[in-house]
Image (tube, rainbow, N blue to C red):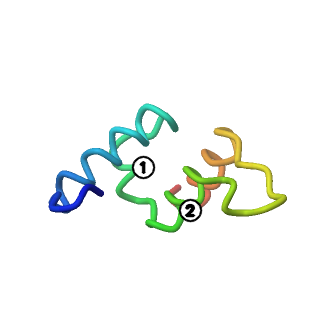
Amino acid sequence: MAKGASFGEGSRRLAGLAARLLGWRPHEFWAATPAELAAILTPEAAPGAAPLSREEMNRLMERDHG
């Protein structure tokens, strides 16, 4: 988040990125934890682990949220 930006401004920007990059709808963005969002946006943070596919992420979200 840019220095001096409010939480609302930063969250709107991140929600927009999640929508464009991940195909997430707003409720999917707000249901994700900051750690989940960081993990999917920076897969290189987990050395040797392949990033989740969209299908895998959708399956996990369906399991957690019905």
What residue occupies the far front of the structure in this picture? 3
Q: Residue at x 70, y 41 (%)?
A: 53
Query: Which label was assigned to residue 28?
Result: 1
Question: Position of 66 compared to 63: left or right?
Answer: left
Query: Looking at the rendering, which quadrant does residue 32 occupy?
Result: bottom left
User: 64 above or below 14?
Assistant: below
Looking at the image, residue 53 sits to the left or right of residue 26; the answer is: right
Residue at the right extreme, as displayed: 48
Q: Which of the numbered marks, if any, corresponds to residue 64?
A: 2
- Mark linked to residue 55: none
Q: Is residue 6 above or below residue 54?
A: below
Q: Quadrant of the N terminus?
A: bottom left
Can the viewer see residue 35? yes
Is label 1 in a helix, a strand or a loop? helix
Residue kind at label 2, given as amino acid type: Asp
The front one of 34 and 30 is 34
Q: Give the foreground label among 1 and 2.
A: 1
Q: Position of residue 33 (x, y in %)?
A: 45, 66
